[in-house]
Image (tube, rainbow, N blue to C red):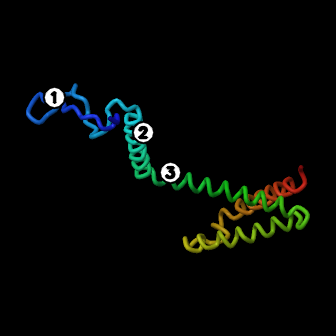
Amino acid sequence: MSPFKKPIDVPPVVQEGIPSPAAPVDYGAVDKSSPYLVKDVQKSSVRSSIRESVREYVKENKSSIVGILLIMLGSFSFSCMFLFVKLMQGTANSFTLVFYRSLVQIVLSLGPIWRNGEHPLGKPEARFWLFVRGGAGASAVLAFFYAIQNLP
């Protein structure tokens, strides 16, 4: 006789229709002493509890999840830019690459700026500092591209 076809013991009844707490759990036609059954039941209950907790976390912290995904997207984009600059090493110099990167950045930035009703050059009282920031950013990108292309 197969160990999975043993007859099942009926748990003792303390009150009518309610099994006692010490009664073994009825798993159907499966052997109760099977180690695989216990592991499978534990795994499935752990998986379902993990799924439920992840779903609750996502519902409560949607903005955090979006922020994390945007950070990951930015990191991936920065890595792709690094790769393309390295691949263009003998073809284009750093100044040309900075120019084309700036063109792409302007095109991607103008849409949201106009949609929000902002002026592309910023508020008149902040324009000087915006130009200083832009010059510092362009110098940093130029130095970064130069380093990528010329350092081993």
Image location of residue 54, percent across then percent down: 44, 47
The crowding category of the residue bearing disc 1, from other C-alpha atoms within 10 Å (few below 14, some 14 to 19, many at least 20), is some
Badge 2 marks a residue whose secondary structure is helix
Q: Which amino acid does label 1 sit on?
A: Pro
Name the residue located 72 percent from the left edge and 70 percent from the top edge: 104
When the figure is inspected, residue 19 is found, relative to residue 102, above or below; the finding is above
Image location of residue 52, percent across then percent down: 39, 46
The crowding category of the residue bearing disc 2, from other C-alpha atoms within 10 Å (few below 14, some 14 to 19, many at least 20), is few
Of the image marks 2 and 3, the number of the one nearer the N terminus: 2
Q: In which quarter of the image is residue 24?
A: top left
Q: In which quarter of the image is residue 9?
A: top left
Q: Which amino acid does label 3 sit on?
A: Ser
Nearer-the-camera pick, 25 or 114? 25
Would you name the residue on which mark 1 appears? Answer: 12
Name the residue located 42 percent from the left edge and 43 percent from the top edge: 47
Image location of residue 96, percent across then percent down: 85, 68
Q: What residue type is labelled 2?
A: Lys
Image location of residue 67, percent across then percent down: 54, 54
In the picture, the disc for residue 43 is 2
